[in-house]
Amino acid sequence: MFRWLIVIFLALMVVNAFTPWFKKLGFGKLPGDIRFPLFGREVFLPITTTVVLSLLAAGVARFL
C-alpha cells in the first residue's frame, strides 16, 4: 500500500508540473469543465479535461 501512495504522489507532482503547459493547449477551458465560487473560493472540476487526458493516456499505453 505504501508503494501505491508513492506512485500517486509522484503522478500528482508530474501533473502539477505540466499544468501550465496544459493550459496553453486549452485544457481546463473545455466545455464540461466546471468553475464556480463556493465560500469565497473558486472551485474547479475538470471533468472533460480528465476524460480527454484519460483517453489519451489509454491510447499511448495501448501502443506501448
Image: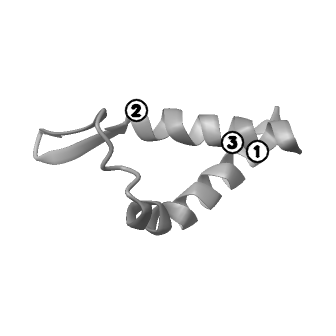
User: Could you tell me if the residues under marks 1 and 3 are in contact, i.e. CB atoms within 8 Å?
Assistant: yes
Q: Position of residue 13 (x, y in %)?
A: 61, 59
Q: In this figure, which colouring scheme has been used for the structure?
A: one colour
Secondary structure found at label 3: helix
Q: In this view, does 21 lie above or below 62?
A: below
Q: In this view, does 16 lie above or below 60?
A: below
Q: Which of 13 and 63 is in front in this view?
A: 63
Secondary structure found at label 1: helix
Q: Where is residue 29 in the image (x, y as percent from the top left)?
A: 30, 49
Q: Position of residue 38 (x, y in %)?
A: 14, 37
Q: Residue furthest right?
A: 64
The residue shown at (72%, 35%) is 58
Identify the amino acid type marked 1: Val
Q: Distance between the residues labelled 1 and 2?
A: 20 Å
The residue shown at (51%, 32%) is 51
Q: Mark 1 points at which residue?
A: 60
The residue shown at (36%, 50%) is 28
Secondary structure found at label 2: helix
Tell me: 40 left or right of 42: left
The quarter of the picture where the C terminus appears is: top right
Instruction: Rate crowding at label 2 as few (under 14), some (14 to 19) or many (20 or more) other CA atoms within 10 Å.
Output: some
Q: Earlier in the sequence, mark 1 or mark 2?
A: 2
Identify the amino acid type marked 3: Ala
Q: Name the residue under label 2.
A: 47
Q: In this view, does 55 lie above or below 24?
A: above
Q: Mark 3 points at which residue?
A: 57
For the question of whether residue 5 can be seen, the reply is no
Q: Which of marks 3 and 2 is nearer the N terminus?
A: 2
